[in-house]
Amino acid sequence: MRFVDKAEFTIKHTKKMKETVLVSGGAGYIGTHTTVELIEAGYDVVIVDNLSNSEMAAVEGVRKITGVNVPFEQVDCTDKEALGRVFDQYKFNSIIHFAASKAVGESVEKPLLYYRNNLQSLITILALMRDKGVRNIVFSSSCTVYGQPDVLPVTEQTPRQPATSPYGNTKQICEDILRDTVHAYPELFGIALRYFNPIGAHPSALIGELPKGVPMNLVPFITQTAAGIRECLSVFGDDYDTPDGSAIRDYIDVNDLARAHVVAVDRMVGGKSKSNYEYFNIGTGRGLSVLELIAEFEKATGVKLNYKIVGRRAGDIEKIWADTTYANKELGWSAKRSTGETLLSAWNWEKKIRGIK
């Protein structure tokens, strides 16, 4: 008779009990970095993405970093039948829902696209969770739910203001849909992470932010300008009520942000949620203006940027940054990487994809 020692039993037991997480929008910028962090934390992952604003190369980057052949399903999350087949094929008890259209400026021009994609994808996922007995969801929310706050920094108790863009409005509505759904069905648990402005790339430079066409976010525009792909960087507005006149944001390293999603899944899987619906601010707690961020980039990389001041952009708010005390205390999470380190990682990623030495 063979006796199994305790260590061997623990390893086998751990493998048997390994949790799987479905990551919708998992080929996107934040989705890829979160998938890496989940795998490094011991989770199995299934990625679902329709590749409308991402590339299969990003999934390959995740596989290269982790050494895991992460399953990938090309499915639109508004397609209940196709997504239902994914629920049937893989066994998972937690979902991180990133899949959404995500540009403030574009949402002003294409509101119906944003309302259809962002609301319908969440409704579809929640309906399937009920149908298939899946319990936990982390929702990718945004600081845009606060609109332009009266008092800064914003805490989780800061009242939500009317959104300044359709994108921001979809995040508010989706939070409400999630809150009402988990209240109606107490077997479900949801956490909304209200994050601020993710920037940077994985230290390996194998994944990073890779926008299709003209970038909608500031840092890819900065790095593309530094690489000579864009002739000039446009700074939208220098007449805001801020020290240098440019808009202020809370820029968080994407790897730090990804870790927050892992902690949120851990919380629900471990039965540590204090209610069925919780929400947390995920930022650094430090506001930087656009002009300060440009100066930080030049300092970190030694590259001078060609930029010009242009008019304000529709839908943009003036200034916002987070009070992260609650997330720091309740989740045991905090942002670690410096802005300079993060901007250098974004530049290293840009150089790698452009073949710049």
Image (cartoon, grey):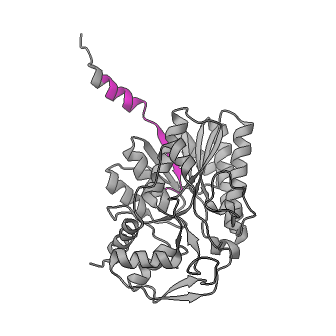
Does 22 lie within the magenta span? yes
Q: Quadrant where the N terminus lies?
A: top left
Quarter where residue 179 is shown: top right
Residue 210 on image: x %, y %: 45, 70
Q: On the picture, is 68 further left or further right than 289? A: left
- Quarter of the image where the C terminus is located: bottom left
Q: Position of residue 160 (x, y in %)?
A: 72, 58
In this view, 230 is above or below 145: below
The count of marks equals: 0
Q: Residue at x 50, y 79 (%)?
A: 291
Is residue 18 among the parts visible in the rendering?
yes
Q: Which residues are magenta?
A: 9-28
Q: Residue furthest front?
A: 243
Q: Residue furthest left?
A: 2
Please indicate, yes or no, whether residue 116 appears anywhere in the rendered image. Answer: no
Coordinates of residue 53 in the picture (x, y in percent)? 53, 67
Residue nearer the viewer, 214 or 267: 267
- Residue 150 shown left or right of residue 65 in the figure: right
Left or right: 143 in relation to 338: right
**Residue 162 or residue 227, whichever sits in front:** 162
Between 251 and 91, the one lying in front of the other is 251
What x and y, as percent, mark residue 266?
A: 49, 39
